[in-house]
Amino acid sequence: MTHPNDNFFERVYSIVRQIPYGKVTSYGAIAKALGTARSARMVGWAMNASHHLEDVPAHRVVNRKGLLTGKLHFDGTNLMQQLLENEGIQVRDNQIVDFDTHFWEPEMPK
């Protein structure tokens, strides 16, 4: 039996897989691209459920202010930050430095 959120989660993952190396996007931007602008929290749930999927770069999804709000869901205290820093993104106090220059705006899937 499939869960009603499975299709939504897969649509979220489809967008997250498109985030370029060295870029980030937000839960809300993904929700907006899916045509469900008020479902940022659901996008967060999808990201939380994605950690068993190696091809979903969940570390590239942050809140609208560039805060690493999902970091508690990664193994190890600073893994999310380390993954971002490996891509050349500077993080200070759990927030992306120069967030606007690293932000990637997803497009609505066709």
Image: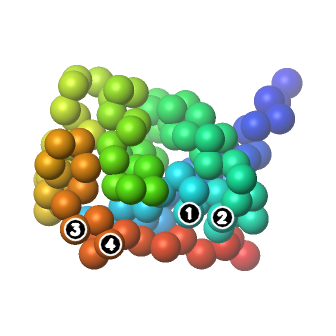
Residue carrying label 4: 100
Is residue 63 positioned above or below 79 on the image?
below
Q: Considering only order in the chain, which callout, 4 or 2, is on the residue closer to the N terminus?
A: 2
Residue carrying label 3: 98
Residue carrying label 1: 29
Mark whose residue sits in front, 2 or 3: 3
Q: Secondary structure at mark 3?
A: loop
In-image side of 89 versus 101 (left or right): left
Amino acid on which disc 4 is placed: Asp
Amino acid on which disc 2 is placed: Lys
Q: Are marks 2 and 1 in contact (CB under 8 Å)?
A: yes
Amino acid on which disc 1 is placed: Ala
Separation (CA) of disc 3 from disc 1:
17 Å
Separation (CA) of disc 2 from disc 1:
5 Å
Q: Residue at x 44, y 50 (%)?
A: 63
In-image side of 89 versus 25 (left or right): left
Q: Residue at x 55, y 31 (%)?
A: 49
Q: Are marks 3 and 1 in contact (CB under 8 Å)?
A: no
